[in-house]
Amino acid sequence: MNSESKYASFSGHLVMLGFGSIGQALLPLLFRHLDIRAEQIKIISADQQGEAIARQFSVNFQQQTLTQNNFQSALAPLLGKDVFLLNLSVDVSSLALLELCCSCGALYLDTCIEPWAGGYSNKLKSASQRSNYALREEVLAFRRNHPGGPTAVVTQGANPGLASAFVKQALINIATDTNVLPGNSECAIDWAALAQQLGIKVIHIAERDTQSTRQRKQRNEFVNTWSVSGFISEAIQPAELGWGTHERYFPDDAAHHPDSCAASIYLNQPGAATRVRSWTPLEGSYHGFLISHGESISIADHLTLKKDEQVLYRPTVNYAYYPCDDAVLSLHEIAGKNWRAQDCKRIIRDDITEGTDELGVLLMGHSKNAYWYGSRLSIQQARQLLPYNNATSLQVVASVMAGIVWSLRNPDAGIVEPDDIDYELVMEITRPYLGDMVGIYSDWTPLNDREELFSEDVDRKDPWQFKNFRVT
């Protein structure tokens, strides 16, 4: 198949919630790869952002803010067994939408699990209750009580989402390069067994975004290459990471979630105030932000091996994000204001002059030390591939497109995560939009170039311990 292939036909209706940077980026891709007409699509957005793009494609556009009080009356008349609800919004509860779609028989997909407006900063909730772990547990509890039914893919963006496919492909690549027979790959246990056999101890979703414009960030302005509101929300959540069985040092400010499967822990500080050492091929060593993301939890959970409810193996998994330089400055400013958001928000796209989004997964601890696998997509490549995109948004919408196609081909799968779906199909659909796909081995460890200026208490026998990551 090529970049113009029609992957699926759809005779029903698609309702898109939210039409910010990701919605606008996705719309032309829908028409390229789905057998769908403009009159089958309806966009509901909280503001008029992107309305001109919707009109260019002759798509129905409705401005309406959805709340706990009106979402059912607004959406229920539009949903049914021939409807796909595509949730690209912020401040609208994913769980509430899942429940509504389940009752109506509609298909569903989102890129992250969202609470209602204010849920991330609710001072009445504990740090654990404001975490991505808690949001995921609510969805999993609903799935246990409602098995089967119409397909609902949760958290199918670039990361979470595409990162899970990258991890599986990276495991296969390492196994091939080290002469390890991967065996079956039909369920999570098979992938966990392969990861254990390879000796994977730590997985970073390692991303460096270097896109920039001639207009630099101004005071009281938050600049980003994707949703500013979405980034601020996850930046102020507690730092979270999947917690590996090899770890011997528990961070002083960390805690387990109560009544949990213990797949992850959280730190008593925002992810945007937590730094972690990581590595990408182009950037080299860097200090990323330990931003809370769903894939840190789901990948760790899916790669868990148990016997008689005793956990035998699990890797440590976390997101190590170094966003575009202006976004870094924006985070420093918002932190200095005690996490109060700036008044002005600017998403850069058409004004980007240069830069690349280097997004991949870094698997560490195996016999070849470290292996980074992922996408190097420049702004020039993104513009040649699809309009209304930058490098960051195209990596997201390619994965969304893959999730939509998988859902249409598997309409009765119930609630699933990216780790549950066919990674080969995801890679097939997304690969034409990811720029240069590379896999590179490295001798980098978090201990490289440490202790040069100041003495530190580090365990050099095993560099893959959380103790050796810098947390500020």
Image (spheres, rainbow, N blue to C red):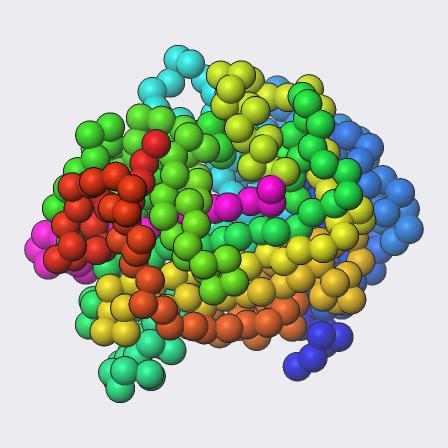
Magenta-colored span: 304-325
**Total labels drawn:** 0
Q: In which quadrant is the C terminus drawn?
A: top left
- Is residue 318 a member of the stretch shown in magenta? yes
Left or right for 135, reference 332: left
| x 20%, y 41%: residue | 456
* Image: 15 above or below 413: above
In this view of the protein, which residue sits in the foreground, 46 or 13?
46
Q: Does the image show residue 115?
A: no
In this view of the protein, which residue sits in the foreground, 335 or 150?
335
Percent coordinates x, y for residue 284 in the rendering: 45, 59
Q: Does the image show residue 57?
A: yes
Residue 368, by quadrant, is bottom left
| x 69%, y 32%: residue | 217
Percent coordinates x, y for residue 70 in the rendering: 66, 23
| x 71%, y 27%: residue | 218
